[in-house]
Image (cartoon, rainbow, N blue to C red):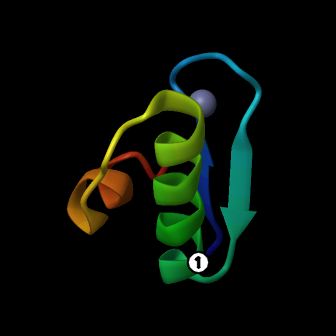
Amino acid sequence: MAYQVDCSEGDGFMIKSEDEQEVVEHVKAHAKEKHDMDLSDDEARDMIQ
Ligand SMILES: [Zn+2]
């Protein structure tokens, strides 16, 4: 099963991977760079669909 996150801000960011931790790291980096948000691992994991 693949893990996927679409950015809720509607900016077209999407990450999909078999590796949950990789998805979490990408989501955290995107949130920090584009939205100036510091997500915890748990918060990033909650966004996985
Ligand atoms: Zn975004």
The residue closer to the viewer here, 35 or 23, is 35
Ligand 1's quadrant: top right
Instruction: Identify the residue at horizontal 24%, vertical 60% (top origin).
Output: 40
Q: Is residue 49 left or right of residue 37?
A: right
Kind of residue sitting beneath label 1: Glu
The residue closer to the viewer here, 29 or 24, is 29
Residue at disc 1, secondary structure: helix
Q: For the N terminus, which image quadrant? A: bottom right
Q: Quadrant of residue 15?
A: bottom right
Q: Tag count in the figure?
A: 1
Q: Residue furthest top?
A: 10
The residue closer to the viewer here, 47 or 33, is 33
The percent coordinates of residue 9 (x first, y second) are 54, 18
Q: Quadrant of residue 41?
A: bottom left
Q: Which residue is mark 1?
A: 22
Crowd around label 1: few <14 · some 14–19 · many ≥20 (10 Å): some
Q: Is residue 32 above or below residue 22?
A: above
Instruction: Identify the residue at horizontal 35%, vertical 60% (top origin).
Output: 45
Q: Is disc 1's CB within 8 Å of ligand 1?
A: no
Q: Quadrant of residue 19?
A: bottom right
Instruction: Identify the residue at horizontal 72%, vertical 37% (top origin).
Output: 13
The percent coordinates of residue 2 (x first, y second) are 65, 70
Q: Is residue 38 above or below residue 41?
A: above
The percent coordinates of residue 21 (x first, y second) are 48, 80
Instruction: Identify the residue at horizontal 51%, vertical 70% (top origin).
Output: 25
